[in-house]
Image (cartoon, coloured by chain):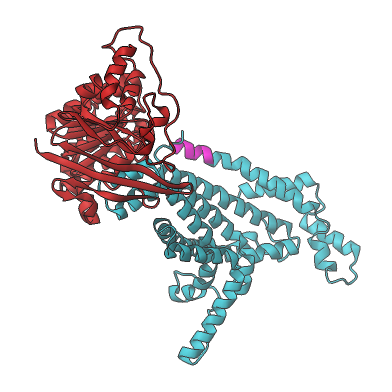
Chain colours: A red, B cyan
Amino acid sequence: MPRLLEVENLKTQFETGAGIVKAVDGISYYVDEGETVAIVGESGCGKSVGAMSILRLIPDPPGKIVDGRIIFEGRNVLELPDSEIRKIRGGQISMVFQEPMTSLNPVLTIGLQLTETMMLHLGLSQDEADKRAVELLGMVGIGEPERRLKQYPHQFSGGMRQRVMIALALSCKPKLIIADEPTTALDVTIQAQILELMRNLTKDMGVALIIITHNLGVVARYAERVIVMYAGKIVEMGTAKQVYHDPHHPYTIGLLNSVPRMDLHRGRRLVPIEGQPPDLTRLDEGCSYRPRCRWAIDKCAASFPPLEAIDGSQIAACFRKDELEKDLKSAS
Amino acid sequence: MYKYIIKRVLLAIPTLFGAALLVFFLLRAIPGDVCEIRLAGTGLYADPAEIELCRDKLGLNDPMIVQFWDFVSGYFTWDLGDSMWTGKPITFEIGLRFKLSLQIAIMATLVAIAIAIPLGIISAVKQDTWMDYAVRAFSIAGIAIPSFWLGIIIILGLLIVTQHWFGAPWMPPIDYVSPFEDPLRNMSQLIWPAVATGYRYSAVATRMTRSALLEVLREDYVRTARSKGLMERVIINRHALKNALLPVVTIIAIEFAFLIGGLVVTEQVFNLNGLGKLFVESVGAQDFNLTQQLVMLVVLIFVITNLVVDILYAWLDPRIRYS
């Protein structure tokens, strides 16, 4: 499938009182048309900032994209004039945010918030946009769409609001949807519904999807490829199957050991990753994971390990990536 | 909503009653009364019998409870009585000045809104640029400059500028004409005090608009609006401003109610015969009747303004639905 999005050496930084925070520090990845890619990592690892950088939604100041290229359909998003980036936002690439409770404007009707985007990007009249809004709400599983359009966000539950956000994201037939932890704020029972809905709708419409999450369970089920981020850098990337069953970075292994898995034997203990994520203002040139890594060696302090191929499409950034598997097997 | 409004109107009655009670007894707690001031105020000898006679005539010797009943029952039956000082009906005394004070309050409010909302928006959107600093300096100056001083400067400026350009000095007219009779003359008199007070009044509202908007611009739904590709103008006007206006509406409304009776010094500077001046005079003369009714008028205006603010709130924010 043709390339849709290509991120090259993206660096996004924030200037704070404590110094420069390198939230995203030179990440490169791609998304093909219609593909679902998951970006996984702990809070504060830069996964959201990286995604927001694609649409240049980083508040500046204090944030700044200092380096890199973001090629969307052959054009570098970072060099587009404001009028062009506005056409991409909502029209070509749309977003679903983490907080459905606060992501919709409380003083405007759902109808207005849905239709204004379609009128802007698709050039629809108010009537046409209303009609399509009704269709969209029906599509995301909201009953009585005509009546619901006249209502305000506070009359919707969290799950319903997230459905509205998905309808909004799909409304202008985008090529790519970026979902930033779309289910984190929802009840567990609703999470699966929302994810199913997003997967089915994006597959039906051939829309590519970037899911940002810290939930590896989500990844295994819904994504084709997985990108694991730690402290602003990509540490492992591969197909979901590769990353899930054959991880080659200590951090990925740590993540997998800290979530319950149905495919492994019962009674297995969950092992948390010890320690805290590093302070992003004080990173040295060594591997940022080494203080928490039980495989760390002296070499890890000297330089950040490069992302190297393991086999085919899987890559990992660890000097000892080939020894881990053996080590794990002997340990268990 | 209608139920709520009716409830609020009914609730105004105890509020007014409480205000009546307070002003009635506070006034009578001050030593002296209108008769003493009228007959002995100049420091000359006054016959105590004559003072007693005056008190009898004005009803000041009646038992307190009777006086209070006269006041309250008169208020609710629109029989406000006469001024103790001039002897003219209070409706006449207040009516004469109310139009002018109301007009200045409305005009000053419009001036304040016209200054505060655009400047507040600019200041918030261009935060920490020279435009923001200029707006903030302008509004700080508005708080710091007393409006009577600004009034004097405006009048002086008018004199100097007209002298310089037209060869003859021009001053705003002194006598009040209704805006419906001669709008031009009316405006040429009242625009200056309205600007002088409106500027001061805008200062607080500007800063409030700025800080409220800055807060709203950091909200998630503004980020959503950006991610939809809307123009910055639409994001501000449609998505942010309606959310940011709530505290600004409150400030403007409270200030408006205050302006009706509180423009004592500005009225003096511009030689206007308004309620503020009447207020001071009636208190100075210990004209109980008139002072009581003026206080009641101001209380009523506050009550009405608060009700209007509540209705505006419900209109601005659908989450607020009074029941």
Magenta-drawn stretch, dominant element (helix, strand or loop): helix
Q: Does the magenta-highlighted stretch encompass residue B80?
A: no
Please count the marks in the image.
Answer: 0
Q: Is residue A118 above or below residue A269?
A: below
* Residue B51 position within the rendered picture, expressed as x and y whole percent measured from the top left: 86, 62
Decide if residue B277 is in sight here.
Answer: yes
B128 sits left or right of B56 in the view = left
Pick the residue in front: A98 or A62: A62
- Toward the front, the furthest residue is A298
Decide if residue B100 is in sight here.
Answer: no
Pick the residue in front: B49 or B250: B250
- Toward the left, the furthest residue is A1
B171 sits left or right of A305 in the view = right
- Span colored in magenta: B1-8
* Residue B139 position within the rendered picture, expressed as x and y whole percent measured from the top left: 51, 63
Q: Is residue B281 above or below residue B79?
A: below
Quadrant location, the N terminus of chain A: top left
Pick the residue in front: A48 or B148: A48
* Residue B191 position within the rendered picture, expressed as x and y whole percent measured from the top left: 49, 71
Quadrant location, the C terminus of chain A: top left
* Residue A314 position within the rendered picture, expressed as x and y whole percent measured from the top left: 20, 29
- Toward the bottom, the furthest residue is B167
Looking at the image, which residue is at 69% across and 57% down?
Answer: B291
Looking at the image, which residue is at 61% across and 50% down?
Answer: B299
Looking at the image, which residue is at 23% across and 19% down?
Answer: A245
Q: Is residue B216 above or below residue A197?
A: below
Pick the residue in front: B33 or B135: B135
B64 sits left or right of A131 in the view = right
Looking at the image, which residue is at 53% across and 40% down?
Answer: B8
